[in-house]
Amino acid sequence: MNKDYNLKEVVLAAFEQFMTIEESDAEKRPAPGKWSAKEIIGHLIDSAANNQGRFVRAQNSNDLIGVEYNQDEWVTAQNYQGENWHDLIILWRQFNLHLAHVMNQTPDDIRTMERTNHNLHVIAYNPVPENEHATLDYFMQDYVVHLKHHLGQVREVLAMGDKE
Ligand code: NI
């Protein structure tokens, strides 16, 4: 059974589309201070990196407490604008294919365990109130929802249509 919320399919389809984008288009900012396609993909690489740690630590813990990260600081500090577009989307694709694998092999009991001690009111894209239980299953799904949100943003920036 597929337990990655279609992450693999979503990433492979987007990759095909993004491969056709020119370097100059990938670094265009839609407005001053707004992220370019390179920077949005960079943010998604940061999301993958941070959530890999969270997904792995949750396997051996009853908690779901993730370290926060400042998304703008991370994007600026790494100068994603200065990296090659194809290199970025290949890294993004491969990292997410690995996370899809991680999701698929996470045992059901770990995935569905109700966790009282969590900070998904802070770190989730669609937050869970602090006084409600959270599951790793929900948090993995939330990761994919966040990713799809930003793929829609990339397509908007590149005027590709096909919004999500
Ligand atoms: Ni985001």
Image (cartoon, rainbow, N blue to C red):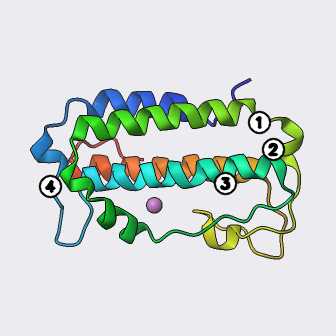
Report how many numbered discs are placed on residues in the image: 4
**Left or right placement of residue 112 versus residue 98 in this view:** right
- Category of crowding for the residue at label 1, using alpha-carbon neighbours closer than 10 angstroms: few (below 14), some (14–19), many (at least 20): some
Say if 44 sits above or below 102 in the image: below
- Are the two marked residues, 1 and 4, in contact with CB atoms closer than 8 angstroms? no
- Are the two marked residues, 4 and 2, in contact with CB atoms closer than 8 angstroms? no
- Category of crowding for the residue at label 2, using alpha-carbon neighbours closer than 10 angstroms: few (below 14), some (14–19), many (at least 20): many
As drawn, the label of residue 111 is: 2
The span from disc 1 to disc 2 (Cα, nearest Å) is 7 Å
The span from disc 3 to disc 2 (Cα, nearest Å) is 13 Å
**Left or right placement of residue 60 versus residue 11 in this view:** right
Q: Position of residue 74 (x, y in %)?
A: 39, 65
Q: Position of residue 29 (x, y in %)?
A: 17, 61
The span from disc 1 to disc 3 (Cα, nearest Å) is 13 Å
- Are the two marked residues, 1 and 2, in contact with CB atoms closer than 8 angstroms? yes
Tag 4's secondary structure?
loop
Residue on which the image places disc 3: 54
The three-letter amino acid code for the residue at tag 1 is Thr
Q: Is residue 46 visible?
A: yes
The three-letter amino acid code for the residue at tag 2 is Arg
Say if 121 sits above or below 20 in the image: below
Tell me which residue sits at (23%, 40%) in the image.
85
